[in-house]
């Protein structure tokens, strides 16, 4: 059994790179966030789906995160997991995710609620140590927080439309 504390310890021991590609989650004036995508990723220019290069860089983290989701949400089959460190995402929609995803917040922090602007889940949701099944096609953002905050977002990819 993988505990939240074991996952948190692995996250705390992980060196997160600065990521400049997820511009949709950046607030005005921000140039990067600290996040890692594991599992499958969409290839640039709509060329399909491939394994993330981070799978090779962070094999232990991927193994633990797969096991963690499987024990907590055994029926959900994810293709990718986004791991975000200490970032309050700007208002955005997840345009490459299928209809629903799972998210959980881990760490020693206060605040940081996930807020939906519209849809069935409209309002603020406390995800600290709690799983939330959500539809990322509705606008959402993260409230400010204090402390160390990690989020795990498990999702399935929308396949690019063939031209």
Image (cartoon, helix red, strand yellow):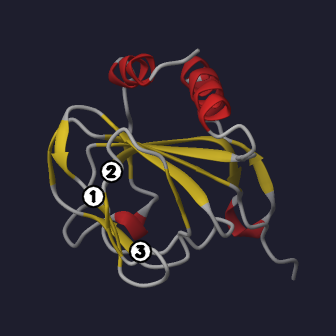
Horizontal side, residue 15 vs residue 21: left or right: left
Q: Quadrant of residue 60?
A: top right
Q: Which mark is residue 92?
A: 3
Q: Gap between marks 1 and 2, in whole Å? A: 18 Å
Q: In terms of secondary structure, where does tag 3 sit?
A: loop
Mark 1–mark 3 Cα distance, whole angstroms, equals 15 Å
Query: Tag on residue 113?
Result: 1
Nearer mark to the viewer, of 1 and 3: 1
Q: Are marks 2 and 3 in contact (CB under 8 Å)?
A: no
SS assignment at label 1: loop
In the rendered view, would you say 58 is above or below 123?
A: above
Mark 1 surroundings: few (<14), some (14-19) or many (≥20) residues within 10 A: some
Which callout, 2 or 3, points to the residue nearer the camera? Answer: 3
Identify the mark nearer the N-term, 1 or 2. Answer: 2
Query: Quadrant where the C terminus lies?
Result: bottom right
Q: Is residue 69 left or right of residue 159?
A: left
**N-term-proximal mark, 1 vs 3:** 3
At x 16% / y 58%, what residue is drawn?
A: 144
Disc on res. 33:
2
- Can you give x and y, in whole percent of width and height, for residue 92 in the image? 41, 74
Q: Position of residue 78 (x, y in %)?
A: 70, 47
Residue drawn at x 36%, y 50% is 127
């Amino acid at each position: 059994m993988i505990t939240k504390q074991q996952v948190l310890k692995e996250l705390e021991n992980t060196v997160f790179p600065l990521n400049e590609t997820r511009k949709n989650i950046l607030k005005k004036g921000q140039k990067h966030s600290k996040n890692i995508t594991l599992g499958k990723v969409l290839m640039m220019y709509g060329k399909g789906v491939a394994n993330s290069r981070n799978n090779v860089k962070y094999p232990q983290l991927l193994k633990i995160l797969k096991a963690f989701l499987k024990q907590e949400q055994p029926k959900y089959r994810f293709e990718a997991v986004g791991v975000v460190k200490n970032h309050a995402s700007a208002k955005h929609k997840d345009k490459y995710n299928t209809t629903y995803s799972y998210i959980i917040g881990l760490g020693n922090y206060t605040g940081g609620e996930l807020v939906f602007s519209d849809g069935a889940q409209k309002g603020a949701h406390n995800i600290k140590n709690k799983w939330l099944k959500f539809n990322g096609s509705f606008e959402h953002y993260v409230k400010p927080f204090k402390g160390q905050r990690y989020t795990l977002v498990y999702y399935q990819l929308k396949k690019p439309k063939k031209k």
